[in-house]
Image: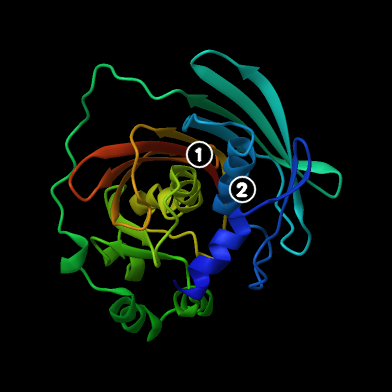
Amino acid sequence: MSTAVETLLSILDLERIEHNLFRGMSPQVGWQRVFGGQVVGQALVAASRTVVGRPVHSMHGYFLRPGDPTVPIVYEVDRIRDGRSFTTRRVVAVQHGKAIFSMGASFQVREEGLDHHVAMPDVPMPEELPGEAEMRDYFLENAPENVRLYWERERPLELRPVNLAHYHSREKFPPAQHVWIRATGALPDDQDIHDCVLGYASDMTLLDTALFAHGRSVFDKDLQPASLDHAIWFHRPFRADDWLLYAQDGPNTSAGRGLGRGLVFTRDGTLVASVVQEGLLRITR
């Protein structure tokens, strides 16, 4: 297991400090604010620790304030309802006495029923695409410092975009992209962990897709990007340490905000999750 994956699992292994209270830490990698996917993943862990035998099927969260990576995050779980088939939880993440994130999550007993899903897009498989080492060489020669630092850092998730054109061009493209993604090491055989790792990963690249139509990137210095809300629907079991295709589109930008949508498929074409996020895309002056 890579060091980065071990760090990710330690970040998701929250400390229980009371019956419904959990404490999470952030990696000390010099970020000015906590990565949004980390808060999503940790909040899902906190909610899951209060539910037995029922996997999460949906979560809806709002980012309220930037997180401070230098201090712990306290997650308070409200056990709203334990029904015969569904369990509902509300989680509030707190730092410095103020809420930085709130989330509602629903869990369901597994049951049989109608079953269909849309087909996976016809794209190259991850083995046919450049690996991380090749992409580092591709990007780092003329990349800005912030982009270079991002690609040089060991990360718990490997990303393989199907098309790299957006990442080195100011050209305007249709707001859609396909990215293969997986953990860089084996994860435990616990579906809750795989769900929470996907929650962590789902905040990556999605908001950037809405910028394709404008020839811009979240790394632009005159752009203020930030996640505002985030929703995930978990449809079927999966493993986050095997390749997942994150098929994304950005159907709208307006009023300083952008909308991103994503479908997550296993490599055999099974749809396992759907994601929607709106984020701040404010041009600074």
Q: Nearer the viewer, residue 81 or 246?
A: 81
Q: Residue furthest top?
A: 84
Q: Which mark is residue 42?
A: 2
As drawn, is 166 to the left or to the right of 104?
left
- Local SS, label 1: strand
Q: Quadrant of the N terminus?
A: bottom left
Could you tell which of marks 2 and 1 lies nearer the N-terminus? 2
Q: Quadrant of the C terminus?
A: bottom right
Q: Nearer the viewer, residue 167 or 112?
A: 112
For image coordinates 54% across by 51% down, the residue present is: 37
For disc 1, the neighbor class at 10 Å (few under 14, some 14 to 19, many from 20) is many
Q: Which mark is residue 278?
A: 1
For image coordinates 60% across by 61% down, the residue present is: 10
- Local SS, label 2: helix
Q: Nearer the viewer, residue 92 or 150?
A: 92
For image coordinates 27% across by 44% down, the residue present is: 265
Residue 145: x %, y % from top left: 52, 80
Tell me how far mark 2 sits from mark 1, CA to CA.
20 Å
Query: Amino acid type of disc 1?
Result: Glu
Q: Which mark is residue 244?
A: none
**Which image quadrant is residue 280 in?**
top right
Tag 2–tag 1 contact (CB < 8 Å):
no
Query: Amino acid type of disc 2?
Result: Gln
Residue 133: x %, y % from top left: 32, 80
**Which image quadrant is residue 80 in?**
top right
As drawn, is 168 to the left or to the right of 2?
left
User: Is residue 140 visible in this depiction of the protein?
Assistant: yes
